[in-house]
Image: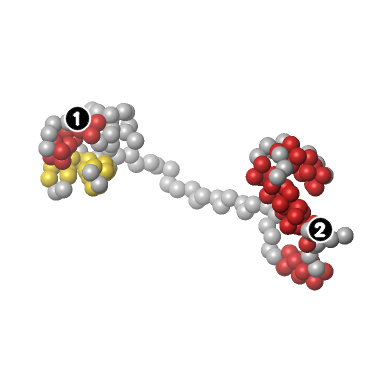
Amino acid sequence: MSINVGKEVAALQRMTVRDLRAKYAETFGEETNANNKAWLLKRIAWRIQALAGGTLSDRAKQRAAELANDADVRTSPPRAKATPVQDQTTKAAVIPLNGDCRVPPPGSVIIRIYKGHALKVLVLTDGFEFEGERYKSLSAVAKAVTGQHCNGFLFFQLAKEGGR
């Protein structure tokens, strides 16, 4: 018995979600909890087409089996490589803090997009560098950029502890 797939799929379009769920149970042999009409339509239409089209040819099945046998399939994950033991002594460098936890450590770059331009400020141990000039505070950098006084932490979005 041949199925007219086009008519079957067109009939699905006119069904309600309740009808589609019943058709899903009939087509797949199990019920579904899905209430998404588009998903149900796609799944049922796919199944109807698959059933109407039949299965793979014997030659295709044989070739798939050959490919599967030739494949180097890993059945277990690779073992973790042992890390070589390093010298147990740890060297720590003391970085002087400038007292404010909102400022990133020296050597960091603060980037802020302002009026379509990326502003890059290098954090130094004794201040900040912006476009080759040194400033004592972020507020001074913000004033140089905007032309008016504003809080540097707010301007560079570092108002909260640790910034972003």
The one nearer the camera, 75 or 56, is: 56
Q: Position of residue 8 (x, y in %)?
A: 76, 53
The one nearer the camera, 31 or 49, is: 49
| Residue for point 66% across, 41% down | 37
Q: Amino acid at mark 1?
A: Asn
Q: Which residue is mark 2?
A: 3
Give the left or right position of residue 92, taking residue 144 as reference: right
| Residue for point 15% across, 41% down | 145
Is 29 placed above or below 104 here? Answer: below
Q: Secondary structure at mark 1?
A: loop
Are the residues at dot 1 and dot 2 in contact (C-beta closer than 8 Å)? no
Q: Which residue is mark 1?
A: 151
Q: Amino acid at mark 2?
A: Ile
- Say which quarter of the image contains residue 153: top left
- Say which quarter of the image contains residue 105: top left
The one nearer the camera, 5 or 113, is: 5
Q: Rounded to the nearest whole Å, what is the CA distance between mark 1 and mark 2?
A: 74 Å
Q: Secondary structure at mark 2?
A: loop
Mark 2 Cα-neighbour bin, 10 Å: few <14, some 14–19, many ≥20: few
| Residue for point 26% across, 42% down | 112
Give the left or right position of residue 71, taking residue 107 as reference: right
Give the left or right position of residue 134, taking residue 92 as reference: left
Count of numbered marks: 2
Can see residue 105?
A: yes
Can see residue 107?
A: no
The one nearer the camera, 98 or 123, is: 123
| Residue for point 78% across, 44% down | 23
